Image: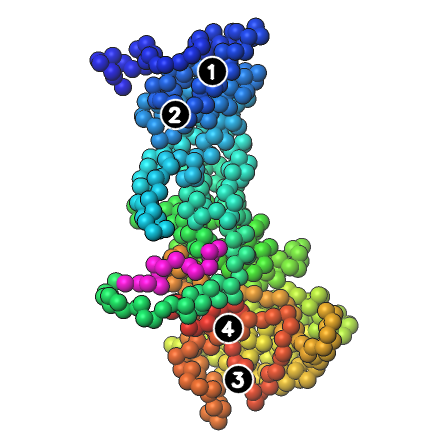
Amino acid sequence: MEVDGRDFFSSPPVKTVRFGGSVVETLAKHKQGDSGDYELLKHQLADPDIKDAQIINWLQEFRSCVTQLTKDHEQLIYTVLRLPWVGRSQAVVEEYMAFLGNLVSAQTVYLCACLKMVVSHFTPSRIQVTRVTICEGGVDISDSEDEDEDLPRSFNQCHQALQLITRYVPSTSRFLVPILQENFPFVQKSSRTLECYVHNLLRVTTYIPSIRRDVLEVIIGMMLKLDVSASRADIEEAEENTVQNQDPTEEGLFDMVTPTDHPSTTAVMAHPVAERLDTLMAVLMAYVKDVCHVNGSLHVERTKDLYKDLLSVFDKLILPTHASCHVQYTLFYLCSFRLALAEAFLDHLWKILQSPSQPAVLRQAAAGYLGSFLARAKFIPVLTVRACLDLLLSWIHRYIDSQDSSGTQAYCDISLHGPFYTACQAVFYTLIFRHRAMLEGNMKKGLEYLQSLNLERVVMCQLNPLKVCLPSVTNMFAAITRKYQVVFCYTIIERNNRHVLPVVRSSAGGDSVTTNTNPLDSFFPFDPYLLRRSGQLIEPLYQVWEELADTELLPDKTGRQGSREDEDDFLCGETPQAEGIVGMTPNSYDSNLRSPSSVGSPPISFQRPF
């Protein structure tokens, strides 16, 4: 940069109004016990109206004596680090970065302080100029768009500073991750604040790739907190209330609908936590796509590396988290890029399920993911589904053999056989969704394959899996296998219903008639995706329940309750509770026929047509 034909940085400091001596003189006086100029220096640096020329002048002086800025001058350095440099002129930014480079090189004791300062600017609140608010009649009419104009430039400056520090101090990554976690905004902050911070964290991983797994762990951990605090029922209720509260008289005032209008995908979520999560899921999925693709083509090695990092986070955080609804779709989306990734994920889940060294709760969760992924991932071909079913049924039959040969009477006990029951439920659930794909093309070979699975032995065994699986899964499986005469389940279902005695008095006191309809505490991780904006990426990959293909499952003599041809039975909202009534018999299964995806799935009235 040149001023009047002279190089700016080699020219004498610009004359500015200041009090006290130079920084070198001030430090010398302070060392001798005279702190007057020292305190005056800190006061001038903390001036909120400090000018660019003043900042440049001070920073040049600090750079000339950086070796003297030891731990004894900690408060002075903290004041310098609080200087408003982001968003200033290019001259100020360059001088400040030069100061940071000198400081961390000569005084590594200030490394963490410098990192915290840079990371603190990863959210808009610290870098936006205060906006003048204009109100008319109590309504804010000021132009809020100005707030975002300088964000890209300001964030770029922060990342340049962080890259500079990393270049001078190679061990920066060791200290950076805890700082990123500590500075993560509170989950109740605005969607914009969370979006900016997560975006900047993901951007850091592009030039410090060694911390990507840790950064993903921090981000996904926070997103899981949002996910579990917004249940499916709460999101559905908020959306339903919003639809009901819309004033029909206001609709159609200017009724100009074009073919490109997609109100369901552009509107924000009614539930505030779901809106924040939707924003973060969109950012994370965009990052996954950008990392895995170069010039529009899939980069295999980069994709494999990201898959390994996400799988590690899945094992550590997502798999042990019960009833998360959306965060796991990050892996679902990544696996859609290449069949080998989906098969690797299935193999990983299978190894967890059949490993006796894993805790039973994780084995059961892995079975839930396995069945839900096979059922819902449209990009998984029938051959892969068959291969997985062969593995599952082989393991199930060996498990039954071990119980039959143990010499003791086997009986239904979830605490002893939890992984077995969840594996059976995964098989039933997969067959419910994928049986048509297995049978179409060659019905004879398809039926021969279903017969070869020996499902009758599984259903009839003494462990009695139909007794503990979700009624929605059991009844739909029974209807489908009855249609194709693969196995007849209704005798067992009736017997189980007679043996299930209601609890007349509960431990909470009072009279109640209850029955546990979900003893496995099951949930299906890939139930329908409820978030709107990020859901646009999931829609084309998602296998929905094809209701029309199964209307023939119901006997002709059984009347349909109302007109339900256009409804999705699997989306009719049968959410399993810890306590509920079981009333399923062969003669009443029409009124109780529900899909397993109805575990927390939205009512059809506002569910997007995936």
For disc 2, the marked residue is 49
> Can you say whether 289 is above or below 389 in the image?
above
Quadrant that contains the N terminus: top left
Q: Is residue 169 at least partly visible in the picture?
A: no
* Residue type highlighted by circle 2: Asp
For disc 1, the marked residue is 41
Inter-mark Cα distance, 1 to 4: 67 Å
Inter-mark Cα distance, 2 to 4: 59 Å
CB under 8 Å between discs 1 and 3 = no
Which of the marked residues, 1 or 4, is nearer the chain's N terminus?
1
Over which residues does the magenta segment extend? 261-274
* Front-most of residues 157 and 383: 157
Q: Position of residue 556 (x, y in %)?
A: 46, 92
Q: Secondary structure at mark 1?
A: helix
CB under 8 Å between discs 2 and 1 = no
Q: Is residue 188 at least partly visible in the picture?
A: yes
Inter-mark Cα distance, 3 to 2: 73 Å
